[in-house]
Image (cartoon, grey):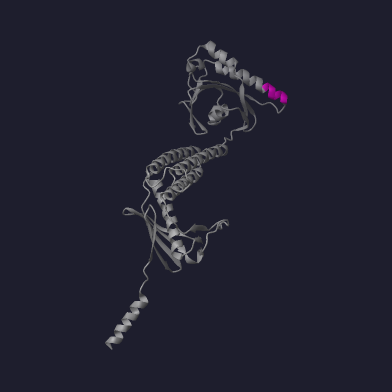
Amino acid sequence: MIMFRSAMLILVAASTAVAEPTRVEVGGPRAVRAEIDTADGQHIVIVWMRPVRVFDAPTNAEINREKARLYALQALAKHLGGAELTLSGASIDKAGPDGNEYRLTLRVPADKVRVAATTTENAAPAADEVRVRAPKLFTAGAEHRQTIHALADAVRQSLRAAVAEKEREQFLESVAAIESAIKDSSKLLRREIEADRLLFDTDDRSGTSRPELLAELTAVRSRILDELTAAVAARKDDCADPKFTAVEIAEPFAAILGADPLLMEVTGAKVVHLADGGRCVIAVASTVVKDASAADRLRAERVCRDKAIAGFLAETRGVQVVHVEKLREEVTVRVEKGREKVTTVAEVLSMTRAEVEGIAKDMPPVGTWKSADGKVFYLAIGRVIEAKK
């Protein structure tokens, strides 16, 4: 009887025993290791690695999360014995520091995984799928290259969030912060690559070439900065002020006047302090449109030019004093406190009245536009005064 009960206990214990997770050593410079279990139709992958610490905390967190996710997928590929996995539906359960390591738990639906014995060179995965290859030999070069592109992905994610900003000022502030971050981060990563003793100072395309990695970092940095410039240029078009129509303004006056609707709306003289130390003088005048004829357009241009010169030389109206600040290709302006500074152009430019009159004679028309309803015609005259060398 006792023997029978003992046998029953052994049988029950064997039937209820839980299989130990499979341990997978991925290795590499980050000493990646993983534990993989399959239960309830899911592959559960827990991965540990040495974390990236070279950047600021938010950037480190983003890059570590992406690196650990990729390592988890590669560990799964190794565990399943395939050269390549194509999968969908993977989700991160937990991720964050674990002592001196970084730990991430990834859940992958087992029925959403396809295992291939050979790698696929040409066919692209479906839009909702991810393709990953089993790890071969992890090198310091491969690790740095992955960090370069993980940094680029993190920056692009921040840029997408910035583009979603509704307020133009907030958008520009976000882009400026991203621009500063990519410059600082790429500088820190460059130092790490330069100091890595596992890299070689030969340009042999071996994957562990320091010059090759530094060139790739420089190229990625340049592409990101170009994307920032393009985003700012696109947002500038989106944020065009609706107060005016039929806007035709020559550069650099278009960038300056278009940066603040007040500069196009308020008539009179404007002195602009440029970022390079030079100055730009502009005078804006307006008149009521009588009809849509060519004769009335000619009349409006003549009237506005005379009024613009008179406003430029006026000693009682005051002057709008403007300072230009540049964010790459985007021009932003700061108008000095108050609608106008009560002074003369001569005082602002530290010139005599005769000198200012000489400038006024040489100021050609630089732009025209109309009010949104087309009832008011505006004309601007202007001139750039180069900085003294």
- In the rendered image, which quarter is residue 377 located in? top right
- Up the image or down, 130 lies above or below 363; here it is below
Evaluate whether residue 74 shows in this view. Answer: yes
Q: Which residues are magenta?
A: 294-299
Residue at left offset 46%, top offset 61%: 77
In the image, taking residue 380 as reference, residue 23 lies left or right, namely: left
Looking at the picture, how far across and down is residue 177, in whole percent?
A: 44, 39
The residue closer to the viewer here, 23 or 205, is: 205
Question: Does the segment drawn in magenta span residue 297?
Answer: yes
Residue farthest to the left? 2
- Up the image or down, 330 lies above or below 267; here it is below
- In the rendered image, which quarter is residue 128 located in? bottom right
The residue closer to the viewer here, 302 or 67, is: 67
Looking at the picture, how far across and down is residue 227, in whole percent?
A: 52, 41
Question: Does the segment drawn in magenta span residue 116?
Answer: no
Looking at the picture, how far across and down is residue 104, in whole percent?
A: 39, 57
